[in-house]
Amino acid sequence: MNSLILRTGTTFVMPLLLVFSLFLLIRGHNLPGGGFAGGLVAAASLALYGLSNGMNASKAVLRVRPETLIAAGLLTAVVSGALGLAVRGSYLAPIWWSIGSVKVGTPILFDVGVYLLVVGVVLTMVFALSAEEPS
Amino acid sequence: MIAAAVGLCFLFALAIGVGRRSFARVPDQLAWLPGAAVLAAVIVAREEDALRLSWLPELGLQFVLRMDGLGRLFALIIACIGVLIQAYAAGYFSGKPDRERLLSLLLFFEGSMLGLAFSGDLLTLFAFWELTSVSSFLLIGFDSQSAEARKSAQQALTITAAGGLALLAGILVLGQIGGSFDLGVLASRAETIARHPSIGWAVALILLGCFTKSAQFPFHFWLPGAMAAPTPVSAYLHSATMVKAGVFLAALLTPVLGSAPLWSESLIGFGAATVVVGGIAALLQTDLKLILAYSTVQALGSLCLLIGVGTPNALHAALALLCAHALYKGALFTVAGCVDKQAGTREITRLGALARRMPVTALAGLLAGLSLIGAVAFAGFTSKELAFKSILASPDTRWLVAVMLLSALSGGGVAILVGYEVFWGKASGPTEHVREAKPIMVAAPLVLAVAGLALPLMAGLWERGLIQPALASITQGQPDKPVQPWYGVDLVLGLSLASWAIAFLVYRRHADLVHWGRAQRAFPSGTVLHAGVWTGILAFAASITRLVQNGRLRWYALATSAAVVALMVLQYAAAPGVPRVGGTGLQAFEALPLLAVMVAAVLAAASWNSLAAVASLGIVGWGLAAVYVDFGAPDLALTQLVVEALTVVLFVFVLRRLPQPRPKPDRWRLPHALFAGMVGCLMAFLAFAVTTTLPHEKVADWHAAMSVPEGQGRNVVNVILVDFRALDTLGEITVLAVAAVGVAAMYRSKLRREADR
């Protein structure tokens, strides 16, 4: 899609959307949001960027292959569960630490895994389906 | 040390498999050292160091390795012959990369077999039982370039694995009846178990496992087929050890099932039939390995028969035969391997007069043959005497003397053919080129053959050290006579003399017998039947696949939705009364998005234009998001909106590649619409039913109340996703990952195929 307005617009909107997706991820435990919604927003922002500037530009922004994100996300989720197994003797049992007034725990880590995986899954499909047909 | 012996085998197998290159530098003369370490572990193992690991104690599942007398005897046979065969195999494949692969597999097999011998729990035993089937498959198909070997391996695997399934079912039935899988516990409840009305099923299924594994008639045909394996494998697995696993299990379960109905009748009946079939077939072959294979079938039949008779005398004889057979048959197989390797053929008609060329092999062959024919002072003599005596001792089993006589004369014929004819018979071709095999290769048959003579000469050690402890673990009774090298002149000796005389006649007329055997083609062999059943199953599977997996996407959608509708309707038809559907209190402004959703859904289905259909679907999604917001689920609404946006993007990419405009409707359109409508109505009805009748409030209240104290979060939806129901989420994201990888892989391979075209 060769549109100057869209190209210029997404150049500004994409980073904002990425920040917004992180915001959704972090606040998700107390307010609407979460890893799934956040991951979808991040993936949508990169897909939009790819639509306007070409998928190669989007891949360059992402730096890693989306398949790597899938693997990393799944691994993060599995590891967060294994921590529960190691510390509390039950797989996926939550562990919480307090840093000042902020609470951090393995469910947050799990959510980060979901976030990474969702970004990877959507972008894998987008990149695959947008691949140019051989002519 | 019990677990160590088993573990060492697997460890060595893995180490040799992984470090193939390094192990290739180990000279042939030392390649048996891993086996020797395992043997040492078996020898020093004591009954006290049993290993019990509890695994799901609620279901009584456990992993038990322990050693009783029977297990020790069996393990010693496995480990002793294991060392010799590994040395032999190193010489057999000297300098070839196959050497490491074979040694690794042999050790893997040895570990499975030792685990089987030491299992104190039926499920543990089953696991090792299956491992031996798998390693047997790998070893029969060792020469994977040969179609013959692959076919034989597959045949052996299907037979033994089918038997393994039957065995598992039998074990489960027995475990239900006896209330435990632990052999000790089961033995203590033997009397109640034997009286249970369903015990016949357990007996039949377990024996089916034993019979397939131990190549009993009518499943015996896989064993001659297994001769496609290299000779060291035939000597080890398909003569001395693995095929005895079925017999071993029958002996092991004698204290539990010995008095159950069907048990001894089946063992005696099938054992006798196997003796007859194997004994006769052995005399009709000309290939050395096939002669020995059918002779092994016959010996396995004898073992089953003796265990079926079940008196202390018969069990005693079975244990003696177990030892004697492992020694002489292992020796004869390795002799046959040496002859095959040095003379270049296994056809008995083309062999003869090799004694001068291969004196040590000839000596081993002669000694093993003497043991097989039952010459005085050899282990084979002792076991044959004991077997005849135990059968004659009871009037019920006296008719079996005829079977045992056939077994004796067949064994005698085989012994003369393999132990004498090959080395001292008339030469049928030039023998000058034949040389004696390497020392490391003749060591195995020689040691085994000499051991067959040494055992009866050290009868006290044999009896007290090996057989008595083994006997004590399967029966409380005592045999009348211990093992001895000589039992005096009596009826049994007379029978032996008669069998020798007939065996000699059989040997003289062997060529005629072979000729007669070749003429008997009318009777279909097991291999042919097996191939027929196999082809039939494959054809059936192919026709089902063609019907169900016909590649039409809409057929899949139709079948899936039809199944869902049918199952749910059936479920409701069986349930007492249809759930009450309560009022909804729908407000007018709430009806608006719902109306939009309905109109858009109809448009999406009816539109001829793909892009319009996608846009209509988008409206459905946005309308749903509005409904979510209205019902106070901002999380869902947010996710729904983003999903809709992304779906449109993906659709656009896909639409590029779909035919435009959409294909014209055909006669399937109406049924499809009907089914889609039914699924929709059903789901709507279910949603109504769930929200109006189930006590959902309690579940929701619990989650809402526990969210902050237990989940440290105020967003209940998110807490449920990442904490309360995190395992579900883990499963879902795994599905997502697989789906994404699948989409990418399919699409890329399609692009590549088009690029190639």
Image (cartoon, coloured by chain):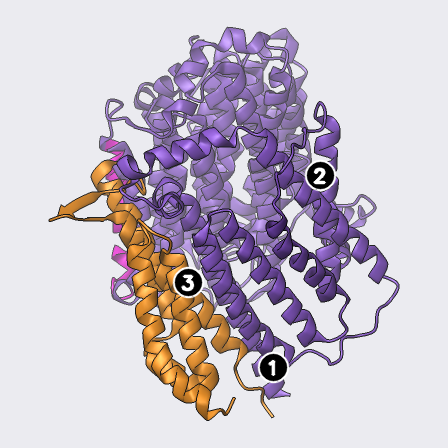
Chain colours: A orange, B purple
Residue B26, magenta (yes or no): yes
First in residue order: circle 1 vs circle 2: 2
Residue drawn 57% across the image and 53% down it: B153
Taking the image as drawn, is residue B143 in sight? no
Identify the chain of the residue marked 1, using the numbered disc in the image: B
Amino acid at pointer 1: Arg
- The image's mark for residue B102 is none
* Image: B690 above or below B417: above
Q: Which residues are magenta?
A: B24-43
- Residue B259, image x and y in percent? 56, 10
Crowd class of label 2 (few under 14; some 14 to 19; many from 20; radius 10 Å): few
Quarter of the picture holding the C terminus of chain B? bottom right
Element carrying mark 2: helix
Query: Is B454 displayed left or right of B291 in the figure?
Result: left
* Image: B366 above or below B543: above
The residue that mark 3 highlights is A118
Quarter of the picture holding the N terminus of chain B? top left
Query: Is B348 displayed left or right of A82 in the figure?
Result: right
Nearest the eye: B522 or B594:
B594
- The image's mark for residue B753 is 1
The residue that mark 2 highlights is B567
The answer to whether tags 1 and 3 share a subunit is: no
Nearest the eye: B355 or B560:
B560
Amino acid at pointer 2: Leu
**Residue B660, quarter of picture:** bottom right
Query: Is B500 displayed left or right of B90 in the figure?
Result: right
Nearest the eye: B601 or B531:
B601
Identify the chain of the residue marked 3, using the numbered disc in the image: A
- Residue B126, image x and y in percent? 47, 33
Residue drawn 52% across the image and 71% down it: B745
Element carrying mark 1: helix
